[in-house]
Amino acid sequence: MMAAIESDLARAAFMLERAKAPTILLGAGARGASSLVCDLARCLGAAVLTTPDAKSLFDETNPLAAGVFSFGATDMAKAVAKETDVMLAIGTNLGEFATQGGSAFAGADVVHMTEDPFDLAIAPRATTTIVGDVAEHMRQLTLQIRTTPATTPWFEGLRARHASPTAADLHPRRGAIDPRQAVRALGRALTPDARVACDVTSAALHVLRDLRFAEGQRLWLQVERSACMGSALAAGLGVRLGSGVPTLVVIGDWGLMMGGSELHTAASMEIGGFVVVVWSNAGGALIRAGVQAQGLDVPAETHTWSSPHFASVARGFGMRAMTVRSARRLARAAAVALRAPYPVLIDAVIEPNAEIPGAGARYLHLDASSGRP
């Protein structure tokens, strides 16, 4: 067995050394080896993509960072995937949320490294597979690489062509916040060691695409194997109590309605540095996008219902709370709340009909992979 692994590692090193456009896809299963990933990426001059659940495991201010791939991917990340000739997938399966079922890297040779054999059963399509201790195998692989990376990353031209629009390019409606501006406002409010927990709503897609995490900051998101609206609130409490650092929960308005007990817990325990931002966009935006992507009509009255007054709901549980309708107020409120000695809920009113990044493309991909017209 050991000889077989050594042979696979040697083959992987050979492929990566000769790659012209190498990419590392980092999954949540590589959580204990993120520093080794950085060393290997620097050695190879490789682009580093992450799966959704692994976002923040790689410093997104690093010039080798290329963003999240698949769910919530930027145009830049999609372009990197398309141009990749050798891809090293670490700590992930090769399924829908990592590689669009393998189709996204169809033109690349794939080295698949994971500790979980179950990962091999999800859309298997690898040239070389290495199963076992990811950190140890990463060390061995790095030792075998003999190459001098270029001073400029191979994908630098792609970065220039696929730059995201600036906040100045966006024009939110009066009384509601453009979601991209909302995410950037939250990014400005974060402390250097902040933790963020996000549930699976349209907010997650905006966080994945537009919120850049620096070294020391971490995101909790669970979408690749299981997902539930509202789960971020309970997870965020655990993250805050376990880490001892300021924690921001970004939760959809439908999700918050599932979390009354968590609000009561936070208020009763007076948990400081704990902020809940309700992504209030009239509910169901992600579901609506999926319906529209399938060519079905969305009733005009869908967004005429009055949303609950979430700040009043929070006050009923004993929390401090406020409603904000501009990105500037959101940034200021979140920054102050993250440093407060008590928990705070911010009801952020988000434009309900704003574009949701990648939602339609995901449904179209699922239709294609299932053979449906």
Image (cartoon, rainbow, N blue to C red):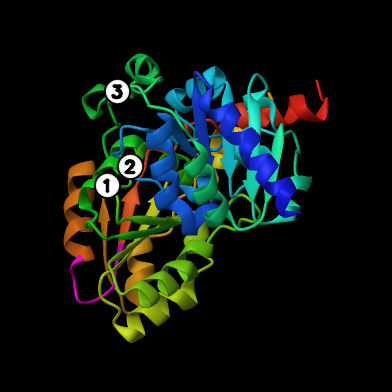
Q: Quadrant of the N terminus?
A: bottom right
Q: Which residue is mark 2?
A: 212
**Residue type for callout 1:** Gly
Q: Residues within 10 Å of mark 2 (few under 14, many from 20)?
A: some
- Distance between mark 2 and mark 1 Cα atoms: 7 Å
Q: Which residue is mark 3?
A: 151
Q: Residues within 10 Å of mark 3 (few under 14, many from 20)?
A: few
**Residue type for callout 2:** Arg
Is the Cβ of the residue at disc 2 closer than 8 Å to that at disc 1? Answer: yes
Residue 245, picture quadrant: bottom left
Magenta region, residue range: 339-345
Numbered circle sitting on residue 187? 1
Q: Position of residue 65 (x, y in %)?
A: 38, 35
Q: Residue furthest right?
A: 371
Residue at disc 2, secondary structure: loop
Q: Position of residue 290 (x, y in %)?
A: 63, 34
Residue at point 34%, 47% (across, down):
349
**Residue type for callout 3:** Thr
